[in-house]
Each structure stands twice: as structure tokens, then as C-alpha cells.
Image: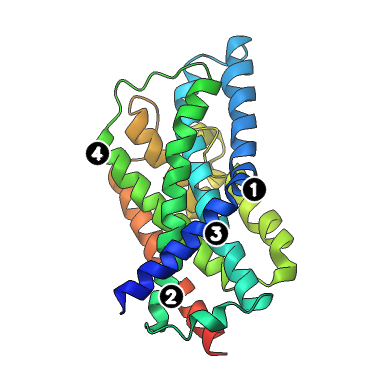
Amino acid sequence: MNLKTFLAMLARDAHVARRNFVQLAFQTLLQPMMFTFIFGRVMTESGLMPPQYKSLLLPGIIALSMIMTGTWAVTMPLIAEFQFTKEIEDRLLAPMNLEWLAVEKVVSGMIQALISGLVVIPMAWLVMGGVSLGDAHIGLFIAIALLVAALSASLGLALGCSVGQQQVGLMFSMVMAPMIFFGCTYYPWAALAKFPIMKRIVLINPLVYASEGFRSALAPNTPHLPKLAILGALVGFDLAFFVLGLRQFKKKAIS
């Protein structure tokens, strides 16, 4: 691999991301912030929700923002470059292996997802009027954040190389929307105890482990999945989506 070429492509994607920052921020952060304000501020201060609910909600909002940002940041450029602008053809001529083009996309998506997570923490904290994070485990939080960033970017790679330009709306309604509402972002996995079948089905949703992972790191006293199960599932999903995305990327690039 030519490291200089790899870094140059990464810098170019960073420039494009900065140029589209406002649009990307509205696309990925507006919905989580609205949910944060309604459920974390209005519902708690009106007495309809207990104040402790804020500690359950904040980790889910972080997970949702990172997943949406990283996935969107990789999926949409890939769809455009493969099917509309054909810009990918110029990249394929770069002096580096084909696989590293996909890796560069994933690294770029990871960086954007991590930035989104860092931005949403103070924003959500302020919108909800303060959340107690005194028992937070910083080391676990960093590990979960890196795994979730890799998950979002790898998922974006898989979707971006598998979905056609005309199917973007269908992708959101059939993939992203169910992932959001059944991803334990606004409630802990334990809250599904009265729905035993659904409680097991949602375990195929990677967002569940992202939400529960941040919950275990930032609010360890609230209900959450076992840490080893969370870490194992995130690593498994990261590898599965990356391998699938890499295979689809090579197939589309060669064809």
C-alpha cells in the first residue's frame, strides 16, 4: 500500500465532509436532538417520566448519532461514486491495492462517527438540562466508541455497495427505520421483558449492542446487557459487515 496515497484520499474525504458539514449535521443530529428534547426534557420536567430516564436516554442518543453519521457518510458517497459521478473509476487508478480503497472509506466514516459522538454528548447533556455521569467507565466508553464507529462505517460500506441509487428511500424505510426503533436507543433491552419473542429477535440488530454498550459505560447502574456479550457482538458485527462490504466493493469495482 502507498501510505501517501492513502492519506491523500483520506484528506480529500475530510475536505468534502467539512464542506458538507452543515447538511450532514442536520441529517444525522436533528432527529436525535428532537427526541432528546421531548423525552429527556419535556417529559421528565413535566413529571411524565422520572428524572433517571435521562441516564437511560443519553447513551442511546450517542449510539444512534454515531451509527447514523458513520453509515450515511460512507453509504451515500459510495452510491454516488459508483452509480452517478463515476468518480470511483479515478480512485481505482491510484497506486494502491483495491482493498485499501474500501479501508479508506471505512476509516473516513469512523472518524466522522467519532466526531458525531463527541459533539452529541455535550449537546444532549445541555438539551436535557444535565445528566449525572459520575459512575462512567472512561476506558470502556472509548472501547465501545471505537467499535461502534467501526460498525457504522462497515455497515455503510456494505449498504453503499449493495443498494442502488433508486433504492435509497427503501433502504431507510426497510433497514434504518426498524434498526432505530428496535435498537434500544430510547429504552433498555430489559424493558422488553414482557415481549419475550421480540426481546430475542432484536438481538440481531447491531444498534442494540451499541446502545447497551454506551449504557454499560456511561450509566452502569442502569439495566444493560452483559459487557462481554456487548463487546463480543460488536466485534462480530464489525467483522461481518466489513467482510461483506469488502466483497461487494470488489465485485462492483471489477464489474
Reading the image, the residue beneath label 1 is 23
Mark 4 or mark 2, which is nearer the start of the sequence? 2
Identify the residue at horizontal 62%, vertical 30% (top origin): 35
Identify the residue at horizontal 63%, vertical 79% (top origin): 86
Label 2: which secondary element: helix
Q: Position of residue 78 (x, y in %)?
A: 58, 69
Identify the residue at horizontal 50%, vertical 67% (top origin): 157
Give how far apart the Cα atoms at labels 1 and 4 are: 32 Å
Please state if 68 lies on the left or on the right of 85 as rendered: left
- For residue 117, say whether it is visible: yes
Mark 3 or mark 2, which is nearer the start of the sequence? 3
Please state if 251 lies on the left or on the right of 111 as rendered: right
Name the quarter where the N terminus is drawn: bottom left
Between tags 4 and 3, which lies in front? 3
Disc 3 packing (10 Å; few <14; some 14–19; many ≥20): few
| Nearer-the-camera pick, 137 or 200 | 137
Between tags 2 and 3, which lies in front? 3
Reading the image, the residue beneath label 3 is 16
Q: Position of residue 66 (x, y in %)?
A: 48, 46
Label 1: which secondary element: helix
Q: Amino acid at mark 2?
A: Leu
Query: Mark 3 and mark 2 in contact (Cβ < 8 Å)?
Result: no
Q: Amino acid at mark 1?
A: Gln
Give how far apart the Cα atoms at labels 2 and 4 are: 31 Å
